[in-house]
Amino acid sequence: MLETSARLLKLLSLLQAHRDWPGPELATRLGVSTRTIRNDVERLRTLGYPVHATPGVAGGYRLGAGAALPPLLLDDEEAVAVAVGLGRAAGGGVAGIEETSVRALAKLEQVMPSRLRRRVNALNTYTVQVPGAAPVVQPEVLTAIANAARDHERLRFDYTGHDGSVTVRDVEPYRLVHMRGRWYLMAWDVGRDDWRTFRVDRVAPRVPTGPRFVPRELPGDVGAFVEKGVNTAMWRYRATVRLFAPAERISRISPDLEVEPVDENTCLLRLGGDDLAGVAVWLGFYDTDFEVVEPPELAEAVAAMAARFRRAAARLRPGA
């Protein structure tokens, strides 16, 4: 039988790992009686851990949320994961979290066994994190969205578009996705009656949240859906281009873009960008003839790029 202090730590670890524990199962795992479990639960409560008990045959114990955060027990893999996550968070992405992440990481490393500290140090030493220019997100915005998604409550927010215009959106929030240094919200847009992707740095939530909603079936893979939205609708400019190449070949080059076959040797490519000159350059990577379907401004950007390349080619000729 474990000593009382060791048993309390083991009991706390079990309560943190599972949402609900029947009393007899806890007693079996710890090799004690159910009466001892009751006494140990009282000791944990005295130490500030809010352990809730449910009476009856189907009753048991559950670790709840208290007024203050009590110490947490982590196994080796959890400790390494938390330490690595804190190190990444210290690099930015969420406004105001850098300093607190460093403080939390210092506390964790102070009590870490040397074997785990070496694993974390190896990961940090041989991993390069390139800081990007992506806008940071306020942590209260992330938590407001996450709480609404968890509680299945509609969310109203002011949304700033590419052109600076602000619209009020009413959505059913489902998932937060972190991709390429930016945060995105995947939600069902009530006003547009369709799934939409929103950049979280452009979201200003309104309070209180709206009525509860019945969750819908997600539109397939969440990551793929957001990736598609990021590559098209999230850009300032959206374009459709007819490529004179098989759709299968273009899809291999750009698997995340929307490619629609027209015939065996022609397809439509839908893509986007914040800069039409950049889109024009990107089209050259496909190494095939193409025709701009829309917008007309992209055709003008392609023409300007072609003229620039012709002048560059002319300078390479002898005597030019």
Image (cartoon, rainbow, N blue to C red):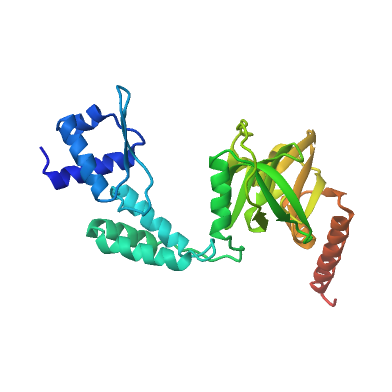
Q: Report the residue at 55% width, 47% height from top.
A: 146
**Residue 216 against residue 43 in the figure, above or below:** above
Name the one closer to the observer, 2 or 197.
Answer: 2
Q: Is residue 27 visible?
A: yes
Answer left or right for 220 relative to 302.
left
Q: Residue at x 73, y 40 (%)?
A: 259
Q: Position of residue 52 (x, y in %)?
A: 33, 38
Position of 21 with respect to 287 (left or right) is left
Q: Position of residue 80 (x, y in %)?
A: 34, 53
Quarter holding the C terminus is bottom right
**Among the 4 quarters of the image, the one containing residue 242:** top right
Q: Residue at x 82, y 72 (%)?
A: 317
Drawn side of residue 178 relative to residue 256, left or right: left
* Depth check, front residue: 110 or 49: 49
Q: Is residue 256 visible?
A: no
Q: Quadrant of the N terminus?
A: top left
Where, by quadrant of the figure, is residue 39 drawn?
top left
Question: Which residue extends farthest bottom?
Answer: 319
User: Where does the image place residue 169, in percent across and percent down from the top left?
Assistant: 72, 48
Q: Position of residue 204 (x, y in %)?
A: 66, 56
- Label tally: 0
Q: Residue at x 29, y 50 (%)?
A: 48
